[in-house]
Image (tube, helix red, strand yellow):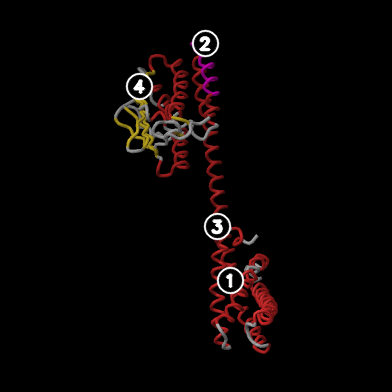
Amino acid sequence: MHPLLSRPSRLLLYMLLWLGIGVVLAAGLRVFQPREWVDALAFAVPLALFYGFVCLSAWWVCRSQPLVSGRGLRAIAVQLGGASQSAAVWVGAAAPWAAFLSARFDLGLDRAGILRDLVLLFVLGIPPYLVSAIAHYLFLAFEASHAAERRVLEAQVTAREAELRALRAQLNPHFLFNSLNSINSLVGADPEGARRMCEGLGDFLRRTLSLGAREAVTLSEELALVDRYLAIEQVRFGERLQIDRAIDPAAAHCRVPPLLLQPLVENAVKHGVSDLIEGGTIRIEARLEAGRLLIAIENPVDEDGSSRRGEGVGLENVRRRLGVLGGRDAQIEVRRMGNRFRAQLTMSADLAPGHPANPGPAPA
C-alpha cells in the first residue's frame, strides 16, 4: 500500500493540495481560452483530483527503478515514459468528462475548444508526475536512511548486550577461583570450616546464577548476595574480618546491575583484610544525594606496603560494565587515603517500581 493511503490525515492534505492545483488549472484554462469560471472549475477540479491519484503510481515505479549507480539513466527514461503514459491516461479521462459536461449541463467549449484543452492537459500533465517521482525518490531515500539508522542502533544494542553478557560471564569463574583457593587453605587446618565454606559457596553460586540472569536488581538484593560472600570469607578469617554498614533505606530500593558490588567487596577482602595480620573492617556505604546513588566500599590496607592501583580483574570488570551501561552517568572512582582504600560508585538513582517515591507497578 502507498504510505499516503495508510493515514487519512495525509490523504486529506494531499487531496487539498490537488484541489488547489485544480483551481490554478481552471485559471490557466481561462487564460488559454476565455470561458466562464463555472465551466473552468467544473472541468478542471475533478480532473485535478483524479490526476493526483494517477501521480501516486510513481511510488511503485520509483521502487522498481531505484536511483543507484549504473542505473540512473534507465530510471530517468522509465520515469519519462511513466509521465507520458500518466498524461495520456489523464487526457483519456478528460475527453469523456468534457463531453459529459457539454451534453448534460451545456458547460464547456465546442469540440475544437475541447481538443485544444486536451492537448494542453497532456503537456501540463508531464511536470506534476515528474515532481511526484522526485518526491517519492526523496521519501524512499529518507526511509532508507531511517532503516539504516535502525540497523545501526540494533547492532549497537546487540553488541552492548553481548559485551554485558561476556563481562557478566567473566565474574563467575573469577569468584569461583578465589573461593576455591579459600577452601583449599582450610582443608588441612579446619576441615569442618572447609565443609561449611563449601555449603556457603553452593548457596552463593545458586543466588549468583539467579540474580545474574536479570537485567537489574535492587541494592538490597545485591547486598544480600554480598552478605553470603562475606559469610564464606568469615569462615576463613573469623574475627579478623569485620563489616560496618551505613545503608540509607531509600538507597536500598534503587536498582543496580547485578553482581556489581561483589568484585569490589572481593577486592577489599583479597587486597585489604587478607594482607593484614590483625585483619580489619570493611565499610559499605550507600546513600542518595541530589538524585544520584552513591555506593562506597572502603577497606584497610597495609600502610607500609606497595600502593595498589586497584585495576584487577574485578575492578576493571566493574569499570567496563558501568561504561557500557551508563556512560558518563555512571562512574567509579578509586583512591587510597593513608591506610584506607576506597572505591566509590556513582550512578543515577533508579528506584524500583512499588517504592513510595516511584509508585509504578511492582514486578510480579
Instruction: Check if mark 2's residue and mark 1's residue have beta carbons within 8 Å.
Output: no
Tell me, for residue 191, which label it has, or none.
2
Q: Give me the C-alpha separation between circle 1 and circle 3.
A: 18 Å
> Whole-Å distance between the Cαs marked 2 and 4?
29 Å
Disc 4 crowd, CA 10 A, few/some/many (<14, 14-19, 20+) = few
- Closer to the chain start, of discs 2 and 4, is 2
Instruction: Find the residue positioned furthest to the front.
Output: 105
Q: Earlier in the sequence, mark 4 or mark 3?
A: 3
> Residue 162 appears in which quarter of the rendering?
top right
Residue at image point 59% right, 71% down: 132
Numbered badge on residue 146: 3
Give the amino acid type for the residue marked by disc 3 in the picture.
Answer: His
Q: Is residue 35 visible?
A: yes
Q: Amino acid at mark 2?
A: Pro
Q: Residue at x 66, y 88 (%)?
A: 110
Residue that label 4 marks:
244
From this viewpoint, is residue 77 visible? Answer: no
Q: Earlier in the sequence, mark 1 or mark 3?
A: 1
CA–CA distance between discs 3 and 2? Answer: 64 Å
- Main SS, magenta region, reads helix
Q: Which numbered mark, 4 or 3, is in the foreground of this view?
A: 3
Q: Which residue is mark 1?
A: 134
Count the marks: how many? 4
What segment carries the magenta color? 188-206
